Amino acid sequence: MAIYTRKGDKGKTALFSGKKVWKSDLRIEVLGTIDELNSVIGVVLSIKYQVLSIKRELLKIQNDLFEIGSGISNPKYSILNTEYYSGRIKNFENMIDSLGIKTPKINSFILPGGGGIGAMLHLARAVCRRLERRVVELNNKRKINNEIIIYLNRLSDLLFTMARFANFKEEKKERIWVKKNG
C-alpha cells in the first residue's frame, strides 16, 4: 500500500468526521502542533538515560496527545474522558512537586539547554506552549474541552521540571539569564 494518496494535493485534508478543510485551518494547525510535540517527545525517548519514571510518563503523554488530537479532530464524537484528564493534571502536579524538590532552587530565569535530554525537554516545553496558544485560539472560535487547555498548561510546566531534573541528574550546569544593565 502506498503512503501517498494525492488527496491533499490541492491544499485540503479531511477531519476525522470526513469534513474537508483547508490545511491552513486552525484545527489542522493544532493537530500538526500536537504531532510536532509528540515527535519531539519521541526524540527525547530515543536518547538513552536512566530516569525510568520520566520515560514511563513521557510514553503516557504520547498516548494522551493522540487522544487529544482525536478529540480536536472530531469534537462532536470526542471520547475524551474529562475525569481521566483531571487525574492526569493532578499526576503532573505531583510529579512537578516531587522532581522540583530534588533540583537546585532557582531565583531567576534559566536559559534552555544543559545536556541533550534537558535541551530536548526544553524544546518540547516550547512546542507545548505554542500548542497551548493555538488550542486557546481554537477554543475562542470553537468550544473544546477545557481540560485540554489545563492539561497542556500543566504539561509545559512538567516538561520544564523534567528538563531541570534531567540536567541535574546528568550533572549539566544550567545557565542563568543575565540581564544587561542599561
Image (tube, helix red, strand yellow):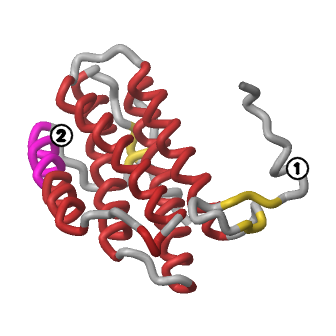
Residue 115 visible within the image? no
| Alpha carbon separation for disc pair 1 and 2 | 51 Å
| Nearer to us: label 1 or label 2 | 1
The residue that disc 1 covers is 9
Q: Is residue 152 magenta?
A: no
The residue shown at (40%, 38%) is 121
Q: Quadrant of the C terminus?
A: bottom right
Magenta extent:
94-102
Q: Secondary structure at mark 2?
A: loop
Residue 128 visible within the image? yes
Residue type, numbered disc 2? Pro
Residue 33: image location, x then y, percent: 57, 53
In which quarter of the view is residue 15 placed? bottom right
The residue shown at (67%, 68%) is 19
Disc sitting over residue 104 in the figure: 2
The residue shown at (50%, 45%) is 37
Q: Quadrant of the N terminus?
A: top right
Is 43 situated above or below 61? above
Residue 29: image location, x then y, percent: 64, 61
Closest to the observer, 20 or 11: 20
Q: Is residue 151 left or right of residue 2?
A: left
